[in-house]
Structure formats: structure tokens, C-alpha cells
Image (cartoon, grey):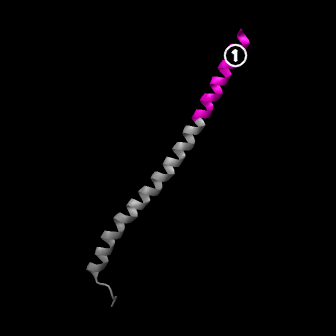
Amino acid sequence: MHPYSFLGQLQALLILAPMCVLIGQGIVGLIFWFLDRKHDAMVAQIEQAALVAIAYREVRRV
């Protein structure tokens, strides 16, 4: 016979399952936050390069 009762195992499952879900959501959220920051930095760099190209073209035009 297993030392833990069925109700004890069920109670542990009801406590551990939501904790695992919340921890998983936190990890996924952190990954997406990091990727979003990386994407924003890349977009800003592209925008800056475009502005430099436009300014260079305007200077050469004069």
C-alpha cells in the first residue's frame, strides 16, 4: 500500500498544477518580452539607417 492517500495526492495535484501553469506562463512571457525588445531594437536600427539615407540623399541633392 502506498503511504499517501488518494485524497492527499489529489490535494497535492490541485496545488502543484496551477503553480506549474503560472511558472510556465511566466517563463513564456519572459521569453516573448525579450524577443519583443530585440525586435524593437532591430526596427529602431532600420529606421535610423533609413533616416540617414534620406538625409544623405537630401545633402547630395543640394
Q: Residue furthest right?
A: 60
Identify which amino acid the numbered label 1 is placed on.
Arg
Q: Which residue is mark 1?
A: 57
Residue 30 is situated, as x and y percent measured from the top left of the image, at 48, 52
Looking at the image, which is closer to me, 22 or 45? 45
Q: Is residue 60 above or below residue 31?
A: above
Which residues are drawn in magenta?
43-62
Task: Name the residue: 30% across, 69% down.
Answer: 14
Q: Main secondary structure of the magenta part?
A: helix
Left or right? Give the position of 44 relative to 60.
Answer: left
Task: Name the residue: 60% across, 37% down.
Answer: 42
Q: Is residue 50 above or below residue 59?
A: below
Left or right? Give the position of 48 relative to 27.
Answer: right
How crowded pointer 1 is (Cα within 10 Å; few <14, some 14-19, many 20+) is rated as few
Task: Name the residue: 32% across, 85% down.
Answer: 4
Left or right? Give the position of 47 relative to 14.
Answer: right
